[in-house]
Amino acid sequence: MGTKILIIGACGQIGSELTLKLRGIYGNDNVVASDIREGNANLMESGPFEILNAMDFDAVSAVIEKHQIEEVYLMAALLSATAEKNPAFAWELNMNSLFHVLNLAKEGKIKKIFWPSSIAVFGPTTPRVMTPQYTVMEPSTVYGISKQTGERWCEYYFNKYGVDVRSIRYPGLISWTTPPGGGTTDYAVDIFYKAIEDKHYNCFLSEKSALPMMYMDDALNATVGIMQAKKEDIKIRSSYNLGGISFTPEEIYAEIKKHIPDFTIEYNSDFRQAIADSWPASIDDSAAQTDWNWSHKYDLEALTKVMLENLTRVLA
Ligand code: AKB
């Protein structure tokens, strides 16, 4: 029998694609998707699904017992922009859900956890270019504070109780299947929809705001890669830097314009500008490369091509 997996927050941008990828690897029946709401037909119909509130310890515990789950991928979270609007709820969701799975692992009810961290753990005092794995970390957003705190707890649970928890600091993720919700890096997905539908984009970040980004396929490979790595190879139990590529709004605009010549853009920064300004421009992920052989495949040119090809088809 294959490994039994539970994905919490399976209907979000990462969860919906991660579920299908894991079902492809471990078998449809072995990967239970769960979320507070129902997801797309593909996700709902290709394997087991449970409505689950990540903050409800008893409910999480019951689903784990019912399906004899061995590994949990905890993808439920409020992202940076939404968390600023509702700090108390963001803290409750992002922290309590993590404690629930860490405690279930501590009690021996699950064997392995994947928990995503983010480039948001860094702050305005962090070196911005090729941000190292170990450096100053003074996050200035609620989301960043929750991810930084979560990293500390993951490392603590590993050191103190031997909990096999693995984590990566995702950059902004770009995909065409499920739109992101509530992040600062979301502009890099929105821009493709608007380029195809309106030929015009009103960007909420300034043209020079460089941020670390990654195409979803690379992020999924990293997620599966760290979870399949040998336990002794995972030397960092807080969270690994994950780099991918780095670009500004003006660079992605120029790349899309190669395919859609009459595409126009204007820049009107809102509150998300301050969040972007506090984050790294690029990331040094050499620790992930050395420890578990991480490398990314998609550059800006390749991801632009695949995004435009697929979204043009889907939106037609
Ligand atoms: C966000 O913008 O909040 C997320 C992230 C970088 O974690 N995409």
Image: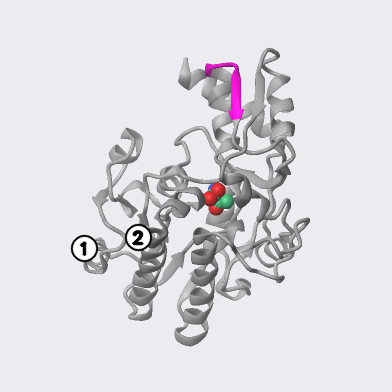
Q: Is residue 75 above or below residue 60?
A: above
Q: Which quarter of the figure has residue 113?
A: bottom left
Q: Amino acid at mark 2?
A: Lys
Label 1 CB sits under 8 Å from any ligand 1 atom: no
- The residue most toward the bottom is 160
Q: Is residue 130 magenta?
A: no
Q: Which quarter of the figure has residue 7?
A: bottom left
Name the N-terminal-most of marks 1 and 2.
2
Q: Is residue 314 above or below residue 210?
A: above
Closer to us: 31 or 141 = 141
Residue drawn at x 36%, y 59% is 89
Left or right position of 48 against 236? left
Q: Badge 1: how crowded within 10 Å, few (<14), some, or many (20+)?
A: few
Residue 307 visible, this orientation = no
Point out residue 149 in the picture as x, y percentages from the top left corner: 51, 71
Label 2 CB sits under 8 Å from any ligand 1 atom: no
* Secondary structure beneath label 2: loop
* Secondary structure beneath label 1: helix
**Where is mark 1, residue-wise?**
66
Closer to us: 224 or 181 = 181
Q: Nearer the viewer, mark 1 or mark 2?
A: 1
Residue drawn at x 67%, y 57% is 294
- Magenta region: 197-202
Residue drawn at x 62%, y 64% is 240
Point out residue 215 in the picture as x, y percentages from the top left corner: 61, 41
Q: Amino acid at mark 1?
A: Lys
Q: Is residue 288 above or below residue 233?
A: above
Residue 184 visible, this orientation = yes
